[in-house]
Image: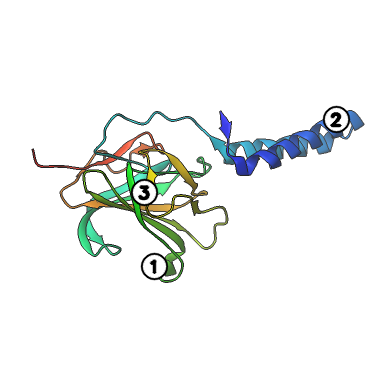
Amino acid sequence: MRLLRLFRLPFAGAVLVALGAAVAGYWLIVVIALAAAGAVYVLGRDPVRNVPSNPLGIVSPVDAEVVSIEAGHDPFLDREAVVAHLRQQWLSPAVLCSPTEGRVQKFWGGPEMPGYDQGDRLAVHLRTDEGDDVVFVVTRPRILPGPLAWSVQPGERVGQGQRRGLAGWGRHVRIYVPARSTAAVESGARVQAGANLVCQLMHAT
Protein backbone atom coordinates (compact mmCIF):
# COMPACT_ATOMS: atom_id res chain seq x y z
CA MET A 1 0.00 0.00 0.00
CA ARG A 2 1.26 3.47 -0.88
CA LEU A 3 1.80 6.34 1.54
CA LEU A 4 0.73 9.91 0.80
CA ARG A 5 3.68 12.25 0.18
CA LEU A 6 2.80 14.45 3.15
CA PHE A 7 3.25 11.49 5.50
CA ARG A 8 6.38 9.87 4.05
CA LEU A 9 8.92 11.98 5.92
CA PRO A 10 7.26 11.61 9.36
CA PHE A 11 6.95 7.86 8.78
CA ALA A 12 10.61 7.53 7.78
CA GLY A 13 11.67 9.69 10.72
CA ALA A 14 9.76 7.57 13.22
CA VAL A 15 11.27 4.37 11.78
CA LEU A 16 14.80 5.80 11.95
CA VAL A 17 14.27 6.87 15.56
CA ALA A 18 13.08 3.35 16.40
CA LEU A 19 16.14 1.80 14.75
CA GLY A 20 18.51 4.18 16.52
CA ALA A 21 16.86 3.57 19.88
CA ALA A 22 17.05 -0.19 19.32
CA VAL A 23 20.79 0.01 18.65
CA ALA A 24 21.25 2.08 21.81
CA GLY A 25 19.03 -0.21 23.86
CA TYR A 26 16.32 2.37 24.68
CA TRP A 27 13.36 0.03 24.33
CA LEU A 28 10.71 2.40 25.61
CA ILE A 29 11.66 4.86 22.88
CA VAL A 30 11.55 1.99 20.36
CA VAL A 31 7.97 1.20 21.36
CA ILE A 32 6.90 4.85 21.24
CA ALA A 33 8.57 5.43 17.85
CA LEU A 34 7.04 2.30 16.32
CA ALA A 35 3.61 3.30 17.63
CA ALA A 36 4.08 6.73 16.04
CA ALA A 37 5.14 5.13 12.74
CA GLY A 38 2.07 2.89 12.82
CA ALA A 39 -0.23 5.84 13.46
CA VAL A 40 1.32 7.83 10.61
CA TYR A 41 0.94 4.84 8.30
CA VAL A 42 -2.73 4.34 9.17
CA LEU A 43 -3.57 8.02 8.73
CA GLY A 44 -1.45 8.56 5.62
CA ARG A 45 -2.10 5.40 3.63
CA ASP A 46 -3.05 5.77 -0.02
CA PRO A 47 -4.80 2.56 -1.09
CA VAL A 48 -5.12 1.60 -4.74
CA ARG A 49 -8.76 1.69 -5.83
CA ASN A 50 -10.46 0.35 -8.96
CA VAL A 51 -12.58 3.05 -10.62
CA PRO A 52 -15.84 1.60 -12.00
CA SER A 53 -16.38 1.63 -15.76
CA ASN A 54 -19.42 3.92 -15.64
CA PRO A 55 -18.99 7.36 -17.26
CA LEU A 56 -22.30 8.63 -15.85
CA GLY A 57 -21.64 7.29 -12.36
CA ILE A 58 -20.75 9.59 -9.44
CA VAL A 59 -18.22 7.97 -7.12
CA SER A 60 -17.62 8.89 -3.50
CA PRO A 61 -14.85 11.48 -2.95
CA VAL A 62 -13.93 9.91 0.43
CA ASP A 63 -14.32 6.69 2.40
CA ALA A 64 -17.64 7.31 4.09
CA GLU A 65 -21.05 6.21 5.26
CA VAL A 66 -24.00 7.40 3.20
CA VAL A 67 -26.25 9.41 5.52
CA SER A 68 -28.91 10.27 2.95
CA ILE A 69 -29.57 10.84 -0.74
CA GLU A 70 -32.59 13.03 -1.40
CA ALA A 71 -34.00 15.95 -3.33
CA GLY A 72 -32.77 19.34 -2.17
CA HIS A 73 -31.38 22.72 -3.16
CA ASP A 74 -27.87 23.42 -4.41
CA PRO A 75 -26.83 26.79 -2.87
CA PHE A 76 -23.75 27.05 -5.06
CA LEU A 77 -25.51 26.91 -8.44
CA ASP A 78 -28.95 27.95 -7.11
CA ARG A 79 -30.82 24.97 -8.56
CA GLU A 80 -32.90 22.02 -7.52
CA ALA A 81 -30.69 18.96 -7.14
CA VAL A 82 -30.26 15.50 -5.74
CA VAL A 83 -28.05 15.83 -2.66
CA ALA A 84 -25.92 13.00 -1.30
CA HIS A 85 -24.79 13.55 2.29
CA LEU A 86 -21.78 11.46 3.35
CA ARG A 87 -20.05 11.13 6.71
CA GLN A 88 -16.38 10.23 6.43
CA GLN A 89 -15.27 7.29 8.51
CA TRP A 90 -12.79 7.82 11.32
CA LEU A 91 -9.23 6.70 10.55
CA SER A 92 -10.14 6.40 6.87
CA PRO A 93 -7.55 7.37 4.23
CA ALA A 94 -7.15 11.14 3.97
CA VAL A 95 -7.49 11.06 0.17
CA LEU A 96 -9.96 13.27 -1.70
CA CYS A 97 -11.03 11.95 -5.11
CA SER A 98 -12.95 13.51 -7.96
CA PRO A 99 -16.51 12.14 -8.11
CA THR A 100 -16.66 12.36 -11.90
CA GLU A 101 -14.63 13.07 -15.01
CA GLY A 102 -14.82 16.58 -16.36
CA ARG A 103 -13.47 20.11 -16.24
CA VAL A 104 -13.23 22.21 -13.10
CA GLN A 105 -15.48 25.27 -13.49
CA LYS A 106 -15.04 26.96 -10.13
CA PHE A 107 -13.44 26.45 -6.75
CA TRP A 108 -14.80 27.98 -3.54
CA GLY A 109 -12.88 28.39 -0.31
CA GLY A 110 -13.13 30.88 2.52
CA PRO A 111 -15.78 32.82 4.43
CA GLU A 112 -17.62 33.98 1.29
CA MET A 113 -18.95 30.52 0.48
CA PRO A 114 -22.39 29.23 1.59
CA GLY A 115 -22.42 27.46 4.94
CA TYR A 116 -18.91 28.49 5.98
CA ASP A 117 -20.14 29.06 9.55
CA GLN A 118 -20.52 25.27 9.88
CA GLY A 119 -16.74 24.85 9.66
CA ASP A 120 -13.89 25.26 7.21
CA ARG A 121 -15.09 24.24 3.76
CA LEU A 122 -14.03 23.76 0.20
CA ALA A 123 -16.32 23.24 -2.75
CA VAL A 124 -15.59 22.29 -6.35
CA HIS A 125 -17.85 22.68 -9.39
CA LEU A 126 -17.21 20.13 -12.15
CA ARG A 127 -18.86 19.95 -15.57
CA THR A 128 -18.85 16.58 -17.29
CA ASP A 129 -18.29 16.07 -21.01
CA GLU A 130 -22.03 15.44 -21.28
CA GLY A 131 -22.78 18.87 -19.80
CA ASP A 132 -23.84 17.79 -16.30
CA ASP A 133 -22.93 20.09 -13.41
CA VAL A 134 -21.65 18.35 -10.28
CA VAL A 135 -20.66 20.18 -7.09
CA PHE A 136 -19.05 18.51 -4.11
CA VAL A 137 -18.42 20.15 -0.76
CA VAL A 138 -16.13 19.01 2.06
CA THR A 139 -16.65 20.49 5.53
CA ARG A 140 -13.98 20.30 8.23
CA PRO A 141 -15.52 20.83 11.68
CA ARG A 142 -13.55 23.49 13.54
CA ILE A 143 -12.69 21.11 16.39
CA LEU A 144 -11.00 18.66 14.01
CA PRO A 145 -7.53 19.49 12.68
CA GLY A 146 -5.91 18.01 9.60
CA PRO A 147 -5.44 18.73 5.89
CA LEU A 148 -8.13 19.98 3.52
CA ALA A 149 -6.90 20.74 0.01
CA TRP A 150 -7.76 20.46 -3.70
CA SER A 151 -5.07 20.71 -6.38
CA VAL A 152 -6.98 21.12 -9.69
CA GLN A 153 -7.58 24.69 -10.85
CA PRO A 154 -10.53 26.05 -12.90
CA GLY A 155 -10.16 25.15 -16.57
CA GLU A 156 -8.22 21.96 -15.86
CA ARG A 157 -9.56 18.46 -16.38
CA VAL A 158 -9.81 15.72 -13.80
CA GLY A 159 -10.59 12.01 -14.14
CA GLN A 160 -13.34 10.06 -12.45
CA GLY A 161 -12.10 8.70 -9.14
CA GLN A 162 -8.74 10.44 -9.53
CA ARG A 163 -7.07 11.46 -6.27
CA ARG A 164 -6.43 15.21 -6.49
CA GLY A 165 -6.65 16.42 -2.91
CA LEU A 166 -6.59 15.72 0.80
CA ALA A 167 -9.75 15.57 2.90
CA GLY A 168 -8.31 14.75 6.31
CA TRP A 169 -10.54 12.77 8.68
CA GLY A 170 -14.00 13.06 10.19
CA ARG A 171 -15.30 15.28 7.39
CA HIS A 172 -18.83 15.86 6.15
CA VAL A 173 -19.29 15.70 2.38
CA ARG A 174 -22.20 16.76 0.20
CA ILE A 175 -22.51 16.06 -3.52
CA TYR A 176 -25.01 18.05 -5.60
CA VAL A 177 -26.04 16.49 -8.92
CA PRO A 178 -28.80 17.33 -11.43
CA ALA A 179 -32.34 16.75 -10.13
CA ARG A 180 -32.99 14.00 -12.67
CA SER A 181 -30.19 11.85 -11.18
CA THR A 182 -30.86 8.73 -9.13
CA ALA A 183 -29.30 7.18 -6.05
CA ALA A 184 -26.91 4.28 -6.63
CA VAL A 185 -26.76 3.16 -2.97
CA GLU A 186 -29.02 3.19 0.06
CA SER A 187 -28.63 5.21 3.23
CA GLY A 188 -26.29 3.49 5.67
CA ALA A 189 -24.10 1.97 2.95
CA ARG A 190 -20.31 2.22 3.25
CA VAL A 191 -18.53 3.57 0.18
CA GLN A 192 -14.86 3.86 -0.73
CA ALA A 193 -13.20 6.91 -2.26
CA GLY A 194 -12.96 6.71 -6.05
CA ALA A 195 -14.35 3.18 -6.19
CA ASN A 196 -18.03 3.01 -5.18
CA LEU A 197 -20.94 4.75 -6.89
CA VAL A 198 -23.14 7.11 -4.91
CA CYS A 199 -25.39 8.55 -7.65
CA GLN A 200 -26.15 7.91 -11.28
CA LEU A 201 -26.58 10.71 -13.81
CA MET A 202 -29.56 10.16 -16.11
CA HIS A 203 -29.85 11.24 -19.73
CA ALA A 204 -32.83 10.94 -22.04
CA THR A 205 -32.38 8.22 -24.67
Residue at x 58% of width, y 41% of height: 43
Residue at x 52% of width, y 49% of height: 168
Indicate whether 98 appears above or below 109.
above
Q: Residue beneath label 2, please?
A: 22
Dot 2 crowding, Cα within 10 Å, few <14, some 14–19, many 20+? some
Q: Residue beneath label 1, please?
A: 113
Dot 3 crowding, Cα within 10 Å, few <14, some 14–19, many 20+? many
Query: Of helix, strand and loop, which one carries label 1?
Result: loop
* Color encoding of the figure: rainbow
Residue 97 % position (x, y): 42, 42
Q: Tell whether label 3 touches label 2 (CB within 8 Å).
A: no
Residue 104 % position (x, y): 36, 51
Residue 18 % position (x, y): 80, 34
Q: Is residue 47 left or right of residue 80?
A: right
Q: Residue beneath label 3, please?
A: 86
- Indicate the amino acid at tag 2: Ala
Q: Is residue 204 left or right of residue 28?
A: left
- Location of residue 58 by image quarter: top left
Mark number displayed over residue 77:
none
- Indicate the amino acid at tag 1: Met
User: Of label 2 and label 3, which has the lower sequence position?
Assistant: 2
- Indicate the amino acid at tag 3: Leu
User: Of label 2 and label 1, which has the lower sequence position?
Assistant: 2
The residue lying furthest to the front in this view is: 155
Residue at x 56% of width, y 28% of height: 1
